[in-house]
Image: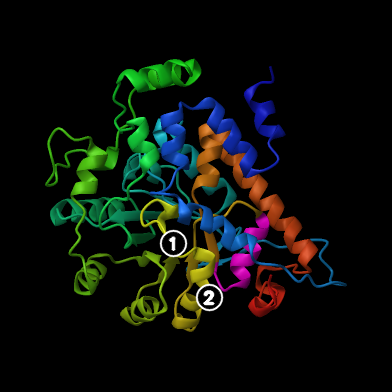
Amino acid sequence: MPGLQERLSNACSIEDLRGLARRRLPRGVFDFFDGGADDEITLRANREGFDRLRLRPRVLVDVHRPDLSTTIAGSASAAPLVIAPTGAIGAGWPGADLAIARVAARLGIPYTLSTMATSSIEEVAAVGGRLWFQLYVLRDQAFARSLLQRAQQAGYEALVVTLDLVTGGKRERDLRNRFTVPLRPNPRTVLDFAAHPRWCLQMLRHGQPRFKNLAGFEGNADPRASIAAKVGQSLDASFDWAALQRLRELWPGRFMVKGVSRADDAARLASLGVDAIWVSNHGGRQLDGAVATADALPEVVAAVQGRVPVLLDSGVRRGTDIVKALALGAQAVAIGRATLYGAAAGGEAGAERALQILTEELRRAMQLCGTPRIADIDASLLQPREARP
């Protein structure tokens, strides 16, 4: 049987890494990472949004040395990529947050730490690189302010406020698998875990994954609930425009908002003075039936009229997806599941393989599209909508 490094090297695509992660992880853990809300309509739509787009390549262009470097939110980046925030990934591989952060720092792209990470703000800060902190808006405002203070003191460049999670989505795979974090044994999960002995031994050696940024958090929730449930029950569903403005005044660095899909919201946010708008539907994990991000992106870009950069996440699995998103007006794309699959399959080496696959595919797509620089990727590369099948 080939070793881990050989299996990772043989992975040709993000889907291959997904397959490796699926084989290595218990079903409940894999489904937690892989699944979406309700009927998973939006989960599928995010991929279909990219699949519907067709490219119109230029020819007779010197593309022998494509340049992936660009600017993201005012600073240089080695590629138009951002690591999106992903929670609880230590359940897939111990220290996965740190592993992905190290790879991002080496590659020279921004890394976004989730509120629900299993490594702390301070642990990830020690890795270095361009670091952003993602905040879920909690009713416990004092605790939320403490997270901001910790991120500021640790030198995080930007705050990313998630706007599209005022209550938790109904993820039926998790309900059927009785999946919780911290991991709780029951007859179903014990059998699931036992069928994956390598993962089990790794968890036993390193201990239960914990949400380290939430140490001491109580919230307004059932004390018997897991910490993930406590956070879900303690989200601030009253958070509004005035509250966002107050939060903006608390943070001295770059201030970004994530979870936008409407032109009117985007225009108002740009007027408010945010530093970037992140088109996202939470990877299809919250509101099922929400518009695909590739479909929402053009109207958001048109609404902000170049006043602020626009990022996009959800459904990005190929280098051609990155080209399509940039052609639609995104300054960069954020990837979550792609590096998560890699890390779950092989830790830091797996995360590195995921980014290697995406950057190699992006480089090749740029050459085949006749775009030697990121700035050369524009709307003329896309087949007009009225002409698409």
Q: Visible in this render: residue 274? A: yes
The residue located at (31%, 27%) in the rendering is 183
Above or below 284: residue 296: below
> In the rendered image, which quarter is residue 16 located in?
top right
Report x, y in % for residue 253. Answer: 34, 65
Report x, y in % for residue 337. Answer: 50, 46
Task: Work out whether residue 57 or residue 243 is closer to the camera in this orientation and state it.
Answer: 57
The residue indicated by pointer 2 is 298
The residue located at (30%, 33%) in the rendering is 180
Classify mark 2: helix, strand or loop: helix
Query: Is 259 left or right of 321, judged from the image as shown?
Result: left
Q: Quadrant of the N terminus?
A: top right
The stretch of residues the image draws in magenta is 319-331
Task: Work out whether residue 360 or residue 386 is closer to the camera in this orientation and state it.
Answer: 386
Report the label total.
2
> In the rendered image, which quarter is residue 190 located in?
top left
Alpha-carbon neighbours of circle 2 within 10 Å: few (<14), some, or many (≥20)? some
- Look at the image and say whether residue 316 sits in the magenta stretch: no
Q: Amino acid at mark 2?
A: Pro
The residue located at (53%, 39%) in the rendering is 341
The residue indicated by pointer 1 is 280
